Image (cartoon, rainbow, N blue to C red):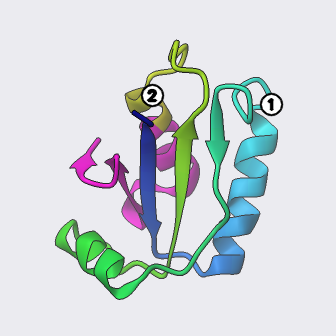
Amino acid sequence: MSIHISCYTTYTLTELQERLNVFSAKYPSIFPGQYELSAVCQPHPLQREVASEYGVNSCSYFVVSVVNKALEISTNEMADMIRTELGKEYVIVLLNGEIPI
């Protein structure tokens, strides 16, 4: 079973891509060896509805997939890193697209 973290943000697609470029460059030992970042996408209306349930009016989203299941950096730690990098008020982080972490 794959493990992934879905991240819904209030950033535009361009803003989010720029921030993710900085984020992944900051941690070359993590990306792509332990975790992989997906392309930045515009959320589907159903995805926007899910994000709105958690108080985020989502304009963009991305997925972080676990590559190394030894989890040297746990999914909770990765979620904290994402919130720190993007700002917790601008992102909601869901484990496997369902569970807030």
Residue 21 at x, y = what percent? 78, 55
- Whether 30 is among the magenta residues is no
Q: Amino acid at mark 1?
A: Pro
The part of the chain drawn in magenta is 79-101
Which residue is more in the foreground, 12 or 1? Answer: 1
Q: Residue at x 54, y 81 (%)?
A: 42
Residue 64 at x, y = what percent? 55, 46
Identify whether 64 is placed above or below 8.
above
Instruction: Return the mark for residue 28.
Output: 1
Q: Residue at x 75, y 65 (%)?
A: 18
Identify whether 24 is placed above or below 30.
below
Instruction: Return the mark for residue 14.
Output: none
Residue 28 at x, y = what percent? 80, 30
> Badge 1, how many Cα within 10 Å: few under 14, some, many 20+?
few
In the picture, measured across the screen, residue 39 lies left or right of residue 8, that is: right
Q: Tell me the distance, in whole angstroms, between the alpha carbons under discs 1 and 2.
A: 16 Å
Q: Amino acid at mark 2?
A: Glu
Of mark 1 and mark 2, the one earlier in the sequence is 1
Asked if labels 2 and 1 touch by Cβ distance under 8 angstroms, the answer is no
Instruction: Return the mark for residue 77.
Output: 2
